[in-house]
Amino acid sequence: MKNKILPILEIFLIVVIPLLTTGLDLFENSKLYNHFFNFDKVSSAIDGFKSDYAQSKKSTIFKESDGKEFVDLWKLIKSYTHATIRSQEPYAISMLKINNPPTVSVPYNAPDVILVPESAPIVAVYFEFSKEKDAKIPRKDIIIVGTVADIERWFLDKKKNIRITINMTISLMSILMGLFIHFAKKNKD
């Protein structure tokens, strides 16, 4: 029995493990991978936030109407934010639009400061409001959870952490099989 298992394990170490790591590199950029790890919805939300302040494609993600996109983004925010958030889920996650020109001047003849969308605050909104109208939301029902840049950084960190976990699992599998083969051959001799 051991004589049949050892060649299979050796082939696995020589062929399958390298194919797994190479395949993972290729698979990591696929739609299926992004869908499997729920990255596609968060990526879509970040892309919606990253546009000109006043021209955001989608500046608010609602719990009721945006379902999966809201859930995935909220999980990411809960995992990484340093803000004190409420135990219940918010009604919406929104980018605060800044009604300023694309640049502002600072005192003392300094050069113009360019406002970039990535610096826009992201808030959890705990107040029900209509999508169709501008809403006046009480300050007590808004919690700033980060910025667009923070969410993008958190998203990349999450992707990196998953990649590290998969690599460590593959490496550990390889080491354990290598040790098994080594000691099995030693016992055989």
Image (cartoon, rainbow, N blue to C red):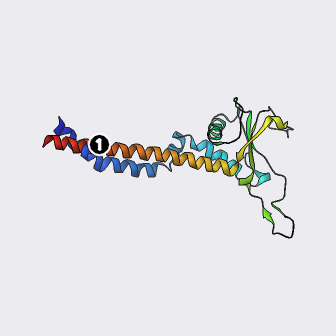
- Is 33 left or right of 42, judged from the image as shown? left
Image height check: is 24 above or below 135? below
Q: Which residue is found at the position 69% from the left and 29% from the top?
A: 87
Give how far across and how far down residue 156 sits, in percent: 58, 49
Three-letter residue code for mark 1: Met
Q: Nearer the viewer, residue 8 or 55?
A: 8
Circle 1 residues within 10 Å: few <14, some 14–19, many ≥20: some
Instruction: Count the marks.
Output: 1
In the rendered image, the quadrant that contains the N terminus is: top left
- Is 183 left or right of 143, judged from the image as shown? left
In the rendered image, the quadrant that contains the C terminus is: top left
Determine whether the residue tagged by mark 1 lies in a helix, strand or loop. helix
Q: Which residue is found at the position 81% from the left and 51% from the top?
A: 98
Give how far across and how far down residue 29 sits, in percent: 51, 50
Instruction: State the residue position of label 1.
Output: 177
Give how far across and how far down residue 126 sits, in percent: 77, 33
Q: Which residue is found at the position 37% from the left and 44% from the top?
A: 172
Q: Nearer the viewer, residue 41 or 12?
A: 12
Q: Nearer the viewer, residue 115 or 178?
A: 178
- Is 161 left or right of 5, judged from the image as shown? right
Give how far across and how far down residue 75 sits, in percent: 62, 37
* Residue furthest out toward the left: 189
